[in-house]
């Protein structure tokens, strides 16, 4: 699996740019704020339709431009393919094309160009709030399982509607008549999310534990525990049982939700905990341990995706090496001996032996 060529128009600070890439390591160099991370964002978005930075589509469109275009030539699934996105500001929906054929959703592109990204922010995932860890898991699962992507979208839609009902009930109590219907549907879809997450985190924990074992020289045991609502005793239970468990938990919080006007419980509050030798990393882990554990999670994600698609995902490393000591740099670099890799760096001469060097300045290729 590899990205051969990429064309950008009005994407972030790229007015118009065409790039070609090596099948191995591609070193993206340049000073700060020149567009290196924007390039990785474009590659990631091309295959997934999700940005690891932007909350809104308009943020990715160049200032004063009406739309942005991303187009890539990909060798995947044993054939040459093309991917093309048109992004519009405002409420106009984006357009997606695969091999010239318009697609309805990003889920239809699953497996064509999966990517795994490391960035400095990811090294602190385990120290931040639960929303960051959910985002990490959701983005990985949306690439692995298109049905999860659809379920997550549906869950968020129902959750938004329920939130509106809880807020409106103070002025119009009659809207509560439809609340049970929304609660039932929320629990049905939420049960699907829990089922997907439990299996994903089980596989992730095993793979990440192996990587961290190597990172620490066998000195630290890595464990990951998935946490969902307290009434779910077994997240691997059938969907029907998970739905009942979620309904039970909602019923226990029914009065509190009415009083606060907020959705207080559900899979949108899920989290996971990482422990090293039984000690909670978030509370007691050192900076080096946290970074090592976060990288282990990403390498594990890449491994799981490679098993699923039969091809190694494209690996994106955004200024991660500069955050690591020489020993950890060597370990990471030893993990990228295969597959296509993109590494951003501010020091042009530092890793020139790794592969092809591409220099970026002010959103242009030098």
Image (spheres, rainbow, N blue to C red):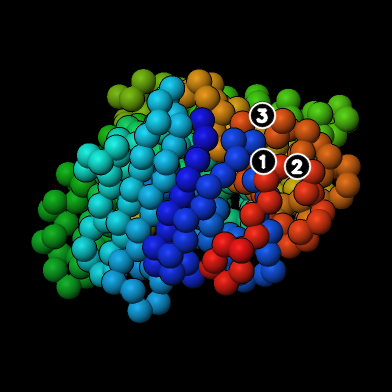
Of 3 and 276, which appears nearest the observer? Answer: 3
Vertical comparison of 287 with 48: above or below: below
Can residue 296 be seen?
yes
**Mark 1: few/some/many CA within 10 Å (<14, 14-19, 20+):** many
Q: Nearer the viewer, mark 2 or mark 3?
A: 2
Quadrant for residue 334, please give it: top right
Q: Please report contact status of discs 1 and 2: CB closer than 8 Å, yes or no.
A: yes
The one nearer the camera, 241 or 97, is 97
In what element is the residue under mark 1? strand
Query: In the rendered view, does 223 fall on the left or right side of 134?
Result: right
Q: Position of residue 244 (x, y in %)?
A: 32, 30
Q: Residue at x 72, y 52 (%)?
A: 320
Tag 3 residue: 338
Q: Residue at x 36, y 29 (%)?
A: 242
Q: Secondary structure at mark 2?
A: loop
Q: Is 295 or 102 nearer to us in this picture? A: 102
Write down the residue under mark 2: 354
For disc 2, the neighbor class at 10 Å (few under 14, some 14 to 19, many from 20) is some
């Amino acid at each position: 699996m590899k990205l051969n060529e990429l064309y950008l128009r009005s994407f972030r600070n790229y007015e118009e740019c065409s790039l070609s890439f090596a099948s191995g390591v591609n070193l993206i160099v340049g000073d700060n704020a020149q567009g290196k991370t924007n390039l990785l964002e474009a590659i990631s978005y091309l295959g997934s339709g999700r940005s690891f930075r932007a909350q809104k589509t308009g943020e990715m469109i160049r200032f004063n431009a009406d739309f942005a275009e991303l187009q890539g030539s990909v060798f995947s699934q044993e054939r040459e393919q093309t991917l093309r996105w048109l992004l519009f500001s405002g409420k106009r929906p984006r357009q997606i094309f695969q091999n010239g054929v318009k697609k309805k959703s990003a889920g239809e592109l699953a497996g064509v160009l999966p990517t795994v990204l490391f960035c400095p922010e990811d090294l602190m995932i385990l120290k931040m709030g639960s929303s960051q860890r959910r985002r990490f898991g959701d983005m990985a699962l949306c690439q692995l399982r298109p049905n999860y992507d659809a379920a997550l979208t549906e869950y968020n839609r129902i959750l938004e509607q329920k939130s509106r009902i809880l807020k409106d009930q103070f002025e119009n109590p009659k809207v509560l008549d439809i609340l049970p219907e929304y609660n039932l549907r929320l629990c049905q879809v939420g049960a699907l999310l829990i089922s997907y997450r439990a299996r994903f985190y089980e596989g992730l924990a095993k793979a990440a534990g192996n990587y961290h074992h190597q990172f620490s020289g066998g000195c630290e045991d890595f464990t990951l525990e998935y946490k969902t609502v307290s009434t779910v005793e077994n997240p691997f239970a059938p969907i029907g049982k998970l739905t009942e468990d979620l309904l039970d938990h909602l019923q226990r919080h029914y009065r509190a939700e009415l009083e606060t006007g907020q959705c207080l419980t559900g899979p949108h509050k899920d989290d996971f905990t990482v422990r090293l030798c039984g000690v909670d990393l978030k509370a007691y882990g050192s900076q080096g341990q946290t970074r090592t554990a976060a990288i282990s999670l990403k390498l594990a994600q890449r491994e799981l995706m490679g098993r699923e698609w039969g091809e190694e995902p494209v690996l994106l490393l955004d200024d991660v090496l500069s955050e690591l000591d020489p020993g950890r740099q060597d370990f990471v670099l030893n993990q990228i001996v295969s597959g296509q890799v993109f590494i951003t760096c501010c020091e042009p001469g530092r890793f020139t032996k790794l592969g092809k060097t591409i220099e970026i300045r002010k959103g242009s290729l030098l």
